[in-house]
Amino acid sequence: MEGQENGQATVVVADDVKRVYGEGDTAVNALRGVSVRIAAGRLTAVMGPSGSGKSTLMHILAGLDKPTSGSVQVGGTEITSLGDDDLTKLRRRHIGFIFQFFNLLPMLTARDNVLLPLTIAGEKVEPAYFDELVARVGLADRLTHRPAELSGGQQQRVAIARALVSRPTVIFADEPTGNLDSRTSGEILQLMRGSVDEYGQTTVMVTHDAKAAAMADRVLYLADGEIVKETGRTDQHEILQIIDSLDLQ
Ligand SMILES: Nc1ncnc2c1ncn2[C@@H]1O[C@H](COP(=O)(O)OP(=O)(O)OP(=O)(O)O)[C@@H](O)[C@H]1O
């Protein structure tokens, strides 16, 4: 863990992170010096227009991409200097992912998709925890189905259970409701909110959706590679007003 902030442990720290893609005339400054600390046990939303750097920031915080300069610590480890093997191990131990297009393995059943992070790590699940998890995400009667036999919402439930199964230090969710209708989105957001409230699961969610951001404890607003504003928990209406005022649409 990384020290304390407002009495809560800080689990992810980014310090003056810059990311330049390409070189010379065609260089793109995707991140221009982002510093942020993510406190444990909270849901943080990252909002901003297309191209503002949200995915780049998430990939760097999750150790999927390296910054051009600056530092990132996850669970107390500086990750920017780690080699690929150590980074892979750190991701397995500390990070869960939820993606817009679910990213489940098509040949595996829902059960085996949920268990995959543990299978890869050579670990076994505690049966009571597994049962509780699948009941919580509403998958108990779908465990033998393959992804193609599940609706989008059900596939995202599998992805949420997969992200939670190893009790990671932090879950990164990239547009988790971007491919779902509004009712299903609401259910998925409730599940994510519930995992924060009941398991204390630290979660960072990139989203375009003000309704999703309104579920978060904290909202970071990114524009042109910088965090230009942040708010605490607030409603959809205020988030939309902030986005308008920052000209972020
Ligand atoms: N691999 C890459 N090579 C070159 N430029 C890139 C690359 N990836 C992203 N960029 C550029 O970096 C900037 C930030 O992109 P990023 O994908 O992080 O934005 P975003 O806020 O996630 O956008 P969206 O909401 O559309 O997913 C954009 O100008 C993008 O074109």
Image (tube, rainbow, N blue to C red):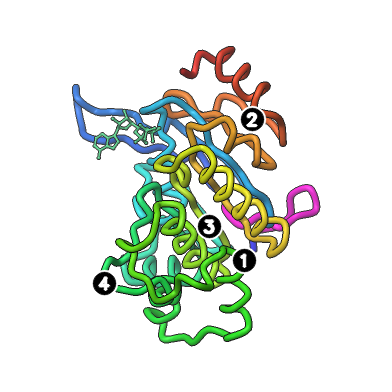
- Looking at the rendered structure, the kind of residue marked 3 is Ile
- Looking at the rendered structure, the kind of residue marked 4 is Met
Helix, strand or loop at label 1? It is helix
Q: Which residue is mark 2?
A: 230
- Looking at the rendered structure, the kind of residue marked 2 is Glu
Quarter for ligand 1? top left
Q: Which residue is mark 1?
A: 136
Residue 61 at what x, y percent from top left?
Answer: 46, 50
Q: Point out the frontmost of discs 1 and 2.
A: 1
Label pair 3/4, CB-CB below 8 angstroms: no
* Residue depicted at 43% across the width and 40% down the height: 178
Residues drawn in magenta: 2-12
* Distance between the alpha carbons at the discs numbered 1 and 4: 24 Å
Q: Residues within 10 Å of mark 4 (few under 14, many from 20)?
A: few
- Looking at the rendered structure, the kind of residue marked 1 is Arg
Label 1 or label 2, whichever comes before in sequence order: 1
* Residue depicted at 72% across the width and 56% down the height: 197
Label 2 or label 3, whichever comes before in sequence order: 3
Q: In the visual, does 146 lie left or right of 27?
A: right
Q: Is mark 2 within 8 Å of ligand 1?
A: no
Q: Residues within 10 Å of mark 2 (few under 14, many from 20)?
A: some
* Distance between the alpha carbons at the discs numbered 1 and 2: 31 Å
Helix, strand or loop at label 4? It is loop
Q: Point out the frontmost of discs 3 and 4.
A: 4
* Distance between the alpha carbons at the discs numbered 3 and 4: 24 Å
